[in-house]
Image: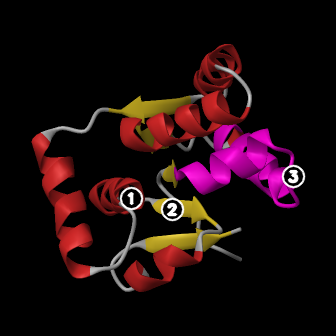
Amino acid sequence: MPRKPKTLVLDSWAVLAYLGDESSAHEIADLIANAHENRVPMFMSVVNAGEVWYILAREFSEAKADSALADLNGLGIELIEADWLLTRLAGTFKARYRMSYADCFAAALAKDRKSDLLTGDKEFEQVEGEVSIRWL
């Protein structure tokens, strides 16, 4: 039986898959439902939320992007500000690995909160030794 995480961090890949009803959307929905049921906090960096917003705004509209981010809040996903400690940790990942800067914030938040990071983005394979990844 897999261990129950204390907290979950969602990266933009997971949120876009969920919102786009992609193949892993049901698995993500189940993880969110289980988090609610078991009172497991869910987090997302504002940098990753910004990434989701601009992708949806570019693909659809700013109104759709605003609505999607409001939906995240309704799902109980707390947006975490990028203070200096989180930004420095993200910078450390960026200095060590070939990852997007936004992905570095997801990894930094997961490491800082000792959370499982929900993603299907293979870029995170580089940080598996430092961050607990829940692959979707």
Q: CA distance from mark 1 to mark 3?
A: 22 Å
* Side of 61 where 122 appears, left or right: left
Quadrant of the snapshot with the N terminus: bottom right
Stretch in magenta: 10-36
Task: Give amino acid for label 2.
Answer: Leu
Q: Residue at x 71, y 39 (%)?
A: 37
State the image coordinates of residue 114 (x, y, percent, origin top left): 35, 61
Q: Which residue is mark 2?
A: 117
Q: Which residue is mark 1?
A: 110
Q: Secondary structure at mark 1?
A: helix
Q: Quadrant of residue 134?
A: bottom right
Callout 2: helix, strand or loop?
Answer: strand
Mark 1 touches mark 2? (CB < 8 Å): yes
Amino acid type, residue under disc 1 in the picture: Ala
Vertical relation: 63 (above or below) 99:
above
Which residue is located at x 65 percent, y 53 percent? 14
Labels 1 and 2: the sequence-earlier one? 1
Query: What residue appears at the point 42 percent right and 60 percent down from the top-left corner?
Result: 103
Quick one: label 2, few (<14), some, or many (20+) residues within 10 Å?
A: many
Q: Examine the structure image and report whether residue 30 is included in the region drawn in magenta.
A: yes
Residue 81 in the figure: left or right of residue 132: left
Residue 47 within the segment the image draws in magenta? no
Label 3: which secondary element: helix
Residue found at x 82% / y 51%: 25
Considering every residue shown, the one lying at the far top of the view is 63
First reached walking from the N terminus: tag 2 or tag 3: 3
Disc 1: CA contacts within 10 A as few (<14), some (14-19) or many (>=20) = many
Labelled disc at residue 26: 3
